[in-house]
Image (cartoon, grey):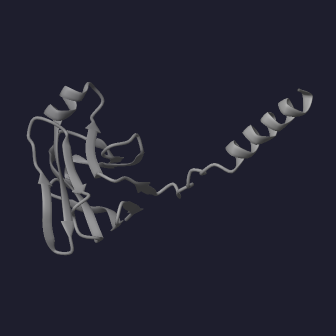
Amino acid sequence: MKYFSLLAIATTFLFFSCGESEEKLPDNVIKNSQGLDIDLEWETGGSSQKAIEDANLDLYLYQGENQIDPSVYYSSFETVSIQSHFKDGDYTIKVKLQNSVDRVDYTIFANGIDANESISYSSYFLSSDKGTIVDYLKIKKEGDTYTITNL
């Protein structure tokens, strides 16, 4: 019986230690079978609703010179997506300040559509930057792997 218990423990250890290990990806890479959502949120020192009233930012997804997905809402934060069926290649995320009463701090979140992976990037505009468009992120899509570079 003593040997049987040791054998069971050894077999269990071997099973778990030889099991499939999860791939460790670099901090700027998201692997997701459904695609990638890119969300833009901002703040001006108050509530989310106050931020939307105080500033208007737009978010754009480009591939090369082609605009793929614009997000230009006037009463909410912005979202664009790189869907899994989009062709592989380089995509650019652009942020535009339409207007702001003062400084506006913004954060871009890159999120796997069907999982909890998320990477965030932050910056700001001053009200004098009205009309400025910033090429903010480059995203390289290779199958279900998205490599994100802060420009």
Horizontal side, residue 74 vs residue 61: left or right: left
Foreground residue among 54 and 88: 88
Q: Position of residue 47 (x, y in %)?
A: 26, 24
Q: Position of residue 137 (x, y in %)?
A: 33, 61
- Counting every numbered tag in the picture gives 0
Q: Position of residue 116 (x, y in %)?
A: 40, 40
Assign the N terminus to one quadrant of the image. top right
Foreground residue among 38 and 130: 38
Name the residue: 19% across, 66% down.
62
Q: Position of residue 3 (x, y in %)?
A: 90, 33
Name the residue: 17% across, 34% down.
52
Horizontal side, residue 75 vs residue 7: left or right: left
Res 142 visible: yes
Horizontal side, residue 14 vs residue 126: left or right: right
Name the quadrant containing residue 6: top right
Name the residue: 55% across, 55% down.
23
**Residue 93 sits above or below residue 125 on the image:** below
Foreground residue among 117 and 67: 117
Name the quadrant containing residue 35: bottom left
Name the quadrant containing residue 103: top left
Please, which residue is most extreme toward the front here? 1
**Residue 83 sits above or below residue 54 on the image:** below
